[in-house]
Amino acid sequence: MKYKETDIQWLGKIPEHWDTTTIKNHFYVIPSNVDKKTKENEIPVELCNYVDVYYNDFIDLSVPFMEATANENEVVKFQLKEKDVLITKDSEDPLDIGVPALINEVKDKLLCGYHLSMLRPKSNKITGDYLFWLLKDTSIASQLWREATGVTRWAIASRHVKNSIIALPPKKEQIAIANYLDNACERIDKIVKIKEKQILKLDNYFKNKISEFTTQGLGSSVLTPTDCLWIPEIKKGWKIKPLKRLLNSKLKYGANEPAINEDTTEPRYIRITDFSKDGKLKNNTFKSLPFDKAKEYLLKEGDVLFARSGATVGKTFIFKDYDGIACFAGYLIKAECNQDLLLPEYLYFFTKSKGYEEWKNIIFTQATIQNIGADKYQYLKISIPPSIEEQREIVDKIINLQKKIDDTKSKIKNQIKTLKNYRKSLIHECVTGKKQIVKAMETVKN
């Protein structure tokens, strides 16, 4: 196949029988202003909203659309049709501008919702299916990102969408490209989902093993029933004790100070947003507190922090191996273990068990808001072995298992990353003519 230069940096060469054009030459661009409110004397409708588009490449009637109302003009103007393409037109992140979804199935009074623009074909020279895949190419979408304006929220004007340059192959090739990408990306997505399920299974396995080790110990055990709802059985000889009886001092709330400073000579000011899912401090969220305000809230090696409210309530973090001084914020509660009775690592891993999750759920059902204060954490019942040595053996076993699982998860995540990168490159090669689709279709069939 012969190619020609386009003089467009991000597009480069395209097949010599292809053209370049702009979206406005072939599509109407219609920004929606239909809000999510329900008003009297308006027509009941359903809305395809921002999240529906952001999380779904293809829109069909399996999507749980929001119910709302709209006036007669809005119903006529924003009624969705098959093969419309919806894109996000404003967002908190400019890279989330121009995310497309293809409408594959519609019904009466299903409208394009707010924060979206509707791209509808006005010529028969380009299909909605092909435009969808064009907009999935990051090099083409980058035109929209560059034109987005804003500070805390970014938006793009319709004129910039209309003026976006796209490659235009003959319609027969458009159909072939869209069909090929439908099939190829569906296969990639299925493999990615399988990989993601593998990670979830590993996480569940790890939680189950922690639950087993912190109630039954290591190896075969004789179990005895308890009167604790979330720990129905424990190893014979073990005890269940409330957290407050295993600490050096009372649970302590953190500093009620704003996180403003970023002075590395001051104590780090640790907040719930500072620790990641793997229990480590993030490097990019550093805040500090002047020593005179931090001195009453300084952390020691082995202190365990509990989140007390919000979406992260119940989440825990162990302060360990930190090179420097740190204090903690008011939405956290500090537990200082009596290490003759309870190892901090054992407490931390206990909070990753199924029993701890069940205890949290019991607390939540008894409260009107998701909030666990020191008054409740102090009575958290914990199953503990009679000796610190046995606790240490259990902790070591969990740490070794965690390393093996983390290594496996890391490999799977790398595989997922490779698959997603391949998907992106495949889309780019197809919609810019770098890949000959006739041959590729034969490969897919085989």
Image: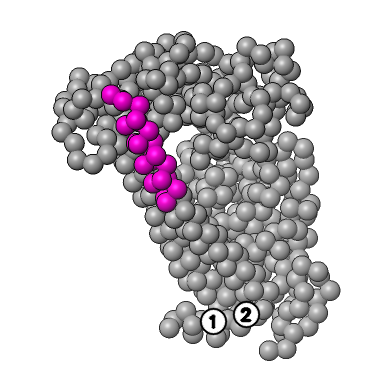
- Residue at figure coordinates x 43%, y 18% from the top left: 338
Q: Can residue 196 be seen from the camera position used here? A: no
Give the residue number, with chain letter if any, for mark 2.
435
Main SS of the magenta part reads helix
- Residue at figure coordinates x 48%, y 66% from the top left: 188
Q: Position of residue 129 (x, y in %)?
A: 57, 67
Q: Quadrant of residue 314?
A: top left
Residue type pointed to by label 1: Ala
Q: Position of residue 94 (x, y in %)?
A: 71, 47
Q: Position of residue 417 (x, y in %)?
A: 55, 59
Task: Report helix, strand or loop for mark 1.
Answer: helix
Circles 1 and 2 in contact, beta carbons < 8 Å: yes
Residue 300 vs residue 239: left or right?
right
- Residue at figure coordinates x 61%, y 42% from the top left: 114
- CA distance for labels 1 and 2: 8 Å
Q: Position of residue 293 (x, y in %)?
A: 69, 13
Circle nearer the N terminus (1, 2): 2
Give the residue number, with chain letter if any, for mark 1.
440
Relative height, residue 52 to residue 172 (above, below): above
Q: Can residue 57 be seen from the camera position used here? A: yes
Residue 224's tag is none
Circle 1: is it few (<14), some (14-19), or many (20+) Cα within 10 Å?
Answer: some
Circle 2: is it few (<14), some (14-19), or many (20+) Cα within 10 Å?
Answer: some
Relative height, residue 38 to residue 367 (above, below): below
Relative height, residue 74 to residue 147 (above, below): above
Q: Which residues are magenta?
A: 386-405
Residue 369 vs residue 325: left or right?
left
